Amino acid sequence: MALLEDGCLAEFYREWEGGRGIVGNICKGRVVRILPGIQSAFVEIGEKRTGFLYVSDAHYLPDPDTSDFEENGEEPPSPRRGQRGTPIEEILTEGEEILVQVAKAPLGSKGARLTTHLTLPGRYLVLMPFVEHVGVSRRIEEEAERRRLKELVMAMKPEGVGFIVRTAAENHPEAQFQRDMNYLLRRWRSIERRIPTATAPTTLYTDLPLRLRVLRDLFTPEFSRIVVDSERVCHEIDDFFRDYMPDVSYHLERYDRPEPIFEFFGIERALNRALSRKIWLRSGGYIVIDQTEALTTIDVNTGRFVGKQNFEETVLRTNLEAVTEIVDQLRLRNIGGIIIVDFIDMDREANRNHVYRALTESLKRDRMKTNILKISELGLIEMTRKRARDSLLHTLCEPCPYCQGRGMVKSVSTVAHELLRALDRSLPTIPEPHVVVR
């Protein structure tokens, strides 16, 4: 599934039929191991690898003075990290059965990240069982509207549950919240009824299919159209809007050209570009993106761009052009975690500040939460970006069987010298040696 902005691929989502992701699943799991040294536990949830539960995700302590939650439509909000509280060995015991939700998908050798802070997302609200709290998305900035939404939901909700008001709720009437709340409460009650008899490990709840999940979380009246190449999916989307979002108007098109839909809209070409290590800029400069398990580095270079003015101006123009491309690539490649951007060195502090401001402004287009440090004397910017799902690289690619994902293989001369050394070791042990190298 592709999201296009001004005709260009901005975000890409993939989910194979029969291979649905597990983020958002609510499971009855079994604690198989507690690690007091790192205040974590492994929980069996019925997947190939056990899930990982941090102590800060094993209990939830809402701040009564807080009315904000970061909410981006991609993953449930997590409890704040770093709060000192009860040690995990006093919260859980090995063999205990607990309710958990998958907060982050397995990545590489790591199992899924789990939380006991359960959430059920709807169009306008997110239900939080066991939490007496109402929060409002930080993306709703007007104080009067925040207060109106919080008071509405506080008056409507039953005891024993909490809610987050999502960004899509801004300026919507009470009736729409009530419908969304009733729907979420029905879903939670059905899960609740299964808990006593379910045998761990088992999945009690799975989220909507990807195509419907993306529409629920991202669709706004600003979308010009939804284009689908499947008659069955067209009917499914029509049913979804009618049953789930009856108040939302939308324009649905059935794509029936002979050319594949991704080819027609240039999505295949954009995906191939997004998998490239080097991305050329229009000016002739380029950026190089290297993703590792620890962090992602992005290097900016002038390349063929020499400019018509002085070198400092050429560097500034290249860095500013790179800013837009970097943010586009972070979104499209869905790069999360630690990111180091190596801009071309700039002598003037004013220019470094200009690039920093341009980056912070451009990142406002990104729904994922980011934290940015000031640009250093060496032109480096350190930042973090919230990881909600696998990167495009992990989604579409797998490690090379020859280089094990390093991107390098031994040269011919290296292999030849290794062979000669192996012969030197072996020949003294072979009576009357006769060696042929082919």
Image (tube, rainbow, N blue to C red):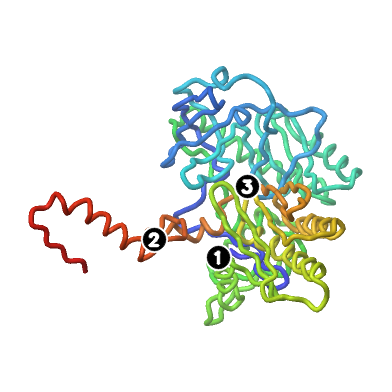
**Quarter occupied by residue 359:** bottom right
Q: Mark 2 points at which residue?
A: 410
Q: Position of residue 170 (x, y in %)?
A: 82, 50
**Position of residue 339 in the picture relative to residue 193 (left or right):** right
Against 357, residue 181 (above or below) is above
Element on which disc 1 rests: loop
* Image quadrant in which the N terminus is located: bottom right
Q: Mark 3 points at which residue?
A: 337
Q: Where is residue 206 in the image (x, y as percent from the top left)?
A: 53, 45
Q: For residue 52, which numbered disc appears in the image?
A: none
> Callout 1, which amino acid?
Leu
Please state which of the two labelled residues, at mark 2 or mark 3, is closer to the viewer: 2
**Position of residue 338 in the picture relative to residue 111 (left or right):** right
* Image quadrant in which the C terminus is located: bottom left
**Quarter occupied by residue 437:** bottom left
Against 234, residue 99 (above or below) is above
Q: Residues within 10 Å of mark 3 (few under 14, many from 20)?
A: some
CA separation, marks 2 and 3? 30 Å
> Callout 2, which amino acid?
Lys
Residue visible at 46% across and 22% down in the picture = 94
> Callout 3, which amino acid?
Gly
Residue visible at 60% across and 53% down in the picture = 296
Q: Residue furthest top?
A: 90
Q: Which of 342 and 58 is in front in this view?
A: 342
Q: Mark 1 points at which residue?
A: 275
Contact check, label 2 and label 3, Cβ < 8 Å: no
Q: Which of marks 2 and 3 is nearer the N terminus?
A: 3
Q: Where is residue 329 in the image (x, y as percent from the top left)?
A: 65, 62
Residue visible at 80% across and 79% down in the picture = 308
CA separation, marks 2 and 1? 23 Å
Q: Position of residue 93 (x, y in %)?
A: 49, 20
